[in-house]
Image: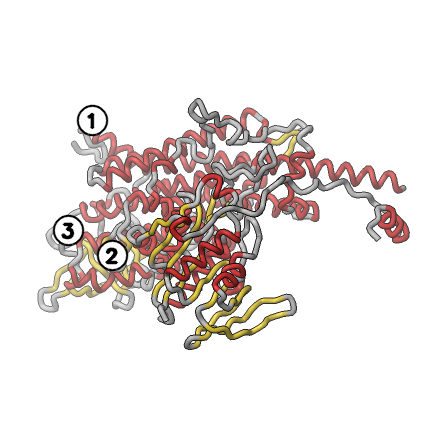
Amino acid sequence: MAPKFCVLYVMTYVHVLTLAVSVNRSQEIPAAGLAFYHRLIFIMALRSAVGRLLINPHRCAIVSASRSQGTAAPARHDAEKTQQKSKAPKVQFNWRDALDLEGQLTEEEIMIRDSFRTYCQEKLMPRILMANRHEVFHREIISEMGELGILGPTIKGYGCAGTSYVAYGLIAREIERVDSGYRSVMSVQSSLVMHPINAYGTEEQKQKYLPKLARGEILGCFGLTEPNHGSDPAGMETRAKYNPSSRTYTLNGSKSWITNSPLADIAVVWAKCDDGKVRGFILERGMKGFSTPKIEGKFSLRASATGMILMDEVEVPEENLLPNVSGLGGPFGCLNNARYGIAWGSLGAAEFCFHAARQYTLDRIQFGVPLARNQLMQKKMADMLTDITIGLQSCLRLGRLIDEKKAAPEMISMLKRNNCGKALDIARQARDMLGGNGISDEYHIIRHAMNLESVNTYEGTHDIHALILGRAITGLQSFTVDK
Amino acid sequence: MSGRVLVGVKRVIDYAVKIRVKPDNSGVVTDGVKHSMNPFCEIAVEEAVKLKEKKLIKEVVAVSCGPQQSQETIRTALAMGADRGIHVEVAGKDYETLGPLQVSKIMAALAKKEDAQLLILGKQAIDDDCNQTGQMTAALLDWPQGTFASEVSLDGDKVKVVREIDGGLETIKISTPAVLTADLRLNTPRYATLPNIMKAKKKKIANVKPADLGVDLTSRLEVLKVEEPPQREAGVKVETVEDLVGKLKETGRI
């Protein structure tokens, strides 16, 4: 009896060693907090006493013990060994940062990114599983982000940080690494509510709203899209009629797919005035006739509350008109601001999916080898790595151009379209690589894949941005059927 | 009282990184490895900034001893709310042998030079786990010490410290100037806010050499060997309790 048991136990232990080795092989230096998190996912997956074995930090010992076992991923060369004093040091390829984006960032941008990444991984990541599963919007995150000072980061003054656009992009990427819904909330508040007030509002409006928005004390939303007018905002049916006697505007109409609206305190609504021009109005919760029902049955961006804005004879004082813009240039300016953040953000989601798929395929053994040993898997990962790396480089260039005030809207369209489309593909591929486990929200990838469907669509669909670029390339517009 | 608090911050390998021993067993691999501020030092900075926010002290000065990269650690402290930094340049061979004795001499010299009311350090660093610098500095300065602090309150020119000790909690009252070392439950360090990170750029970091402070950096210790812990061996399953006792006796465990 006894010998049989011993053999069984040893065999199980060897199997565990193999798993442990593959886990170790993949934990390369520098292993940021993300690697720790992957370890956590792996532990959750195993969920047994065996799993507890692997949390032992002295696992490195197991590596040296089983070096004799040939395994899939070879150990990385010691960076010191490869450095020769006479020649230039050999550059090690880093799949986490293939074109050394880190070296292109300023010390401040690195600090901002690192500090915010820690917040996202420590405070947002633990909430997202249940928030997404049960469709709960945690209003507190806006207050938390306000405390960190990352709302409206590019605005100067009014309690805002006044950072570069590159820093804004890095922030968006870190939030979206956790969830696109959370990043949508931040984008709306920063680019679609604070930005128009800052760019087109009066000094009184800025003083009244911006500091509170920056602190996350009040939540805003952006009302442009209508049930019957999504890609063609010019055709909007919401009307603003001026009443000279009361010096108010009466707004009538409905907006749909409005992020934050069910809980928003204020709404920046775009409506057509008597002269046929589109203008922006700040509506406040409590105004008679203003209601924001929630849209139910959403299977995307579930951690963010989305709803309609219904306006039934809402009286808006003329002080709430945004006076410094008329025409669609107003909303488009805001959208471009947000789209830039989305171009960065979608790559954050893509990076999460890529890293998660990589870790899973290294850990999962089928037919006696890790999934990552297979060519089909490696090709997929190579494509993911390339798209993400190139995408990030283009984002950095765009961010620097915007900071130098040398950017055109079509540049932003190009990157939003490319990065969101690629990120969606990456998420879908990653979902596939995880097999059955890929549809479980515990592995998070399916949530990103669901979310990126929206991200690819909102702020200008993939096709619409193609038309924007087509017009810029050919000089011929193809939005409408008329000439 | 000067109202100035000195906080020591150490640049260490990030807690989440898997450590690798160098092939020549002389130390651990640090090149290309992610570094960050020692977690206990973060708690120390947070406590100092809290005291300043309560207006009990006037200025927080962050100090770090190390190579050029230590400035990043000081910047993080500045982003958390410290007012200015002092970078004590120690590089190369000196940095490899830098230990609690040398750092405590530097800290003692700086505490006197800056006329500090309090010197707050982390209780230990997560790389060497020495837990000595605070105590040594207090001895060199002949200042009272409140170590393993889980609660600190200023009361005039005295400090009440609740210490975490083996038996439970010990409350002491010591007079300032004093040395405190922060334990885990003292506070939860804040995330550096974006505006503070941007302000940190403008705050000053002074450069000082140990020689300027009259400190001799020679180490009395020599690292002979660094090696990984012994590998975990296969277990053996036994049938009965008697077998277990027998096996334990066999291997000399009991």
The amino acid beneath tag 3 is Val
Q: CA distance from mark 3 to mark 2?
A: 13 Å
- Mark 2 Cα within 10 Å, few/some/many (few <14, many 20+)? many
- The answer to which quarter of the image holds residue A107 is top left
- Which corner quadrant holds the N terminus of chain B? bottom left
Image point 72% across, 42% down: which residue?
A: B232
The amino acid beneath tag 1 is Thr
Residue A268 shows which numbered tag? 2
The amino acid beneath tag 2 is Val
Q: Secondary structure at mark 1?
A: helix
Q: Is residue A351 above or below residue A85?
A: below
Residue A216 shows which numbered tag? none
Q: Secondary structure at mark 2?
A: strand
Q: CA distance from mark 2 to mark 1?
A: 34 Å
Q: CA distance from mark 1 to mark 3?
A: 29 Å
Chain containing the residue with disc 3: A
Nearer-the-camera pick, A414 or A174: A174
Return the disc, 1 or 3, that comes first in the chain's sequence: 3
